[in-house]
């Protein structure tokens, strides 16, 4: 702003705002239109929820597009508090993905005061006569953010679920139906269940060991059982063991 017009500066008015009747009317119209908030990019400054199982919460946001005064100087917005955020939910079914501090998303602003509806979670009269105010905003996230490290990815190659920590399925019944199912564990795979049932042929590539804590476990097989090489029971080889002959003093030949 030049020294010459510092004394006549009136907030958003520019140098030519009153230069003509048309300019003056345009200025007034633009000011009235500028009071109506529609939608803008915002950044999350606070969140009431943190991914736990809870109702949809609220966020405090900072509008990122600055205001400008009549001389083109930036006038940053203040933080807008208590905006309900969007969750994909139908009835009691939902995808819980709460926003986090630092996220960038979009805030849309209702035509009328929604404070009574927010408080009652039901039909209500406007809480005041304000119109298209930033206080009546709602947050929809997911704009201009970085590369995720935990995600569900949909592509032509299929669906991929990736987590750097843990993926947990919690349900009374889990069913997997597919032509092929492969489990690749680089360290170990553990199944804890009272009964483990396999319906179909079983191929095992590797060693098998049985442990049952302090007491021996039992194995029951409804044969026939075919062993290609040797079978050892209680330290005795089934294919090479011999018996001592009573009276003759010698041992029998190994089984044929």
Image (cartoon, rainbow, N blue to C red):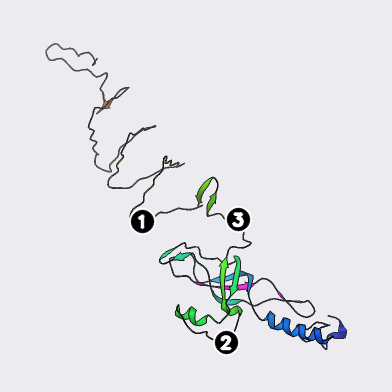
Disc 2 or disc 3, which is closer to the eye?
2
Disc 2 or disc 1, which is closer to the eye?
2
Task: Find disc 2 in the rendering and name its residue.
Answer: 129
Callout 1: helix, strand or loop?
Answer: loop
Q: Residue furthest right?
A: 4
Side (left or right) of 216 relative to 94: left
Task: Find disc 1 in the rendering and name its residue.
Answer: 171
First-in-chain label (2 vs 1): 2
- Is residue 144 placed above or below 211 in the rendered structure? below
Residue 29 x %, y %: 72, 83
Q: Which residues are magenta?
A: 51-76
First-in-chain label (1 vs 3): 3
Side (left or right) of 107 relative to 235: right
Q: Quadrant of the N terminus?
A: bottom right
Marks 2/1: CA–CA distance: 48 Å
Identified at 79% across, 86% down, the residue is 24
Q: Nearer the viewer, residue 86 or 4?
A: 86
Residue 217 x %, y %: 25, 39
Task: Find disc 3 in the rendering and name its residue.
Answer: 147
Res. 202 image quadrant: top left
- Is residue 145 placed above or below 162 in the rendered structure? below
- Was residue 68 drawn as part of the magenta stretch in this picture? yes
């Amino acid at each position: 702003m030049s020294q010459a017009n510092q004394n006549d500066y009136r907030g958003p008015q520019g140098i030519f705002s009153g230069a003509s009747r048309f300019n003056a009317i345009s200025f007034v119209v633009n000011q009235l239109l500028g009071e109506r908030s529609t939608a803008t990019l915002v950044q999350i400054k606070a969140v009431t929820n943190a991914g736990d199982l809870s109702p949809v919460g609220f966020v405090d946001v900072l509008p990122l597009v600055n205001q400008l005064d009549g001389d083109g100087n930036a006038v940053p917005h203040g933080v807008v508090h208590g905006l309900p955020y969007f969750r994909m939910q139908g009835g009691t079914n939902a995808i819980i993905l709460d926003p986090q501090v630092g996220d960038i998303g979009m805030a849309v602003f209702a035509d009328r005061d929604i404070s009574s509806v927010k408080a009652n979670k039901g039909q209500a009269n406007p809480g005041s006569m304000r119109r298209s105010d930033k206080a009546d905003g709602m947050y929809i996230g997911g704009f201009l953010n970085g590369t995720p490290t935990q995600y569900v990815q949909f592509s032509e190659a299929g669906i991929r679920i990736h987590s750097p920590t843990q993926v947990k399925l919690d349900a009374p019944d889990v069913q997997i139906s597919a032509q092929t199912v492969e489990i690749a564990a680089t360290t170990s795979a553990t199944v804890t269940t009272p009964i483990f049932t396999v319906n179909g042929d079983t191929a095992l590539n590797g060693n098998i060991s049985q442990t049952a804590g302090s007491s021996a476990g039992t194995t029951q097989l409804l044969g026939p059982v075919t062993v290609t090489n040797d079978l050892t029971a209680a330290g005795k080889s089934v294919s090479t063991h011999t018996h001592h002959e009573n009276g003759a003093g010698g041992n029998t030949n190994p089984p044929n």
